[in-house]
Amino acid sequence: MLQMTPQYNTILFTEVWDESESFITDFKGSVFDQMTLFDTNTLELVFGLLYAKYGNNPIANNDVNQFKAKVFSVLFSYGPTWLKRLDIQNKLRELSDEEITRGGKAIYNNALNPDGAPATQSLEELSRINSQSTTNYKKSRMDAYAQLWELLDVDVTTDFINKFKICFKQFVRPEEPLLYYEEN
């Protein structure tokens, strides 16, 4: 049977973590698990996404501990924003037609001879007004759907997982010559 020898001089992602449990254990034991933002389900998802994208990629570091620290620092740096963006996209998906067509509201107040001098730097409203006019905006269904489409069209997960690219070797050909051998 013809076999190929390894072609990289560092180990692969799957040789560092072959299952989510070891990934989670290493993360929970690191200095990067300070804010407890990442529960077990989230860490399993991150591991699955990393495995799918980088499973057979050689790590960039010769030191496995430094590689782990680099992965966990990327997770610490970009993970919270990724989670919030996923949450926002989920909320956008749950909006009703009425909610997406509802536009903004503008209120214009006019106060003649107020009982106190208004501050020019203050955002506080005057307690008495003489007149008020309002403008209520309503979007057409087409405009509302187009705006929602644009908001949901962003792939936040791919952008997040691509941040880990710095943890893996980037090259166009193997580092060592490919050697084939045949067992007798």
Image (tube, grey):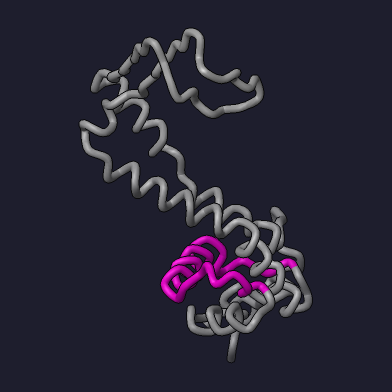
Q: Is residue 139 left or right of residue 22?
A: left
Q: Nearer the viewer, residue 169 or 117?
A: 117
Q: Nearer the viewer, residue 99 or 61?
A: 99
In the displayed structure, 94 sits above or below 26; it is above
Outermost residue to the bottom:
184
Q: Is residue 65 above or below residue 174?
A: below
- Can residue 15 be seen here? The reply is no
Question: Is residue 61 visible to the viewer in this orientation of the structure?
Answer: yes
Q: Residue at x 29, y 28 (%)?
A: 145
Does the segment drawn in magenta span residue 172?
A: no
| Span of residues in magenta | 32-60
Residue 90 in the image: state x and y as whole percent: 35, 49
Report the residue at 35% width, 32% height from top: 149
Return the residue nearer the eye: 90 or 174: 90
Does residue 177 appear to the left or right of 150 in the view shown?
A: right
Query: How many numbered marks, from 0 up?
Result: 0
Quadrant of residue 132 within the rendered picture: top left
Split into 4 quadrants, where in the image is the C terminus?
bottom right
Q: Residue at x 69, y 53 (%)?
A: 172
Percent of width and height locating residue 152:
38, 39
Residue found at x 39% / y 11%: 130
Image coordinates for residue 14, horizontal then vertical, percent:
56, 76
Left or right: 96 as drawn, with respect to 74: left
Corner quadrant of residue 118: top right
Residue 9's spot in the image, x, y percent? 75, 74
Q: Return the residue found at the far front.
A: 115
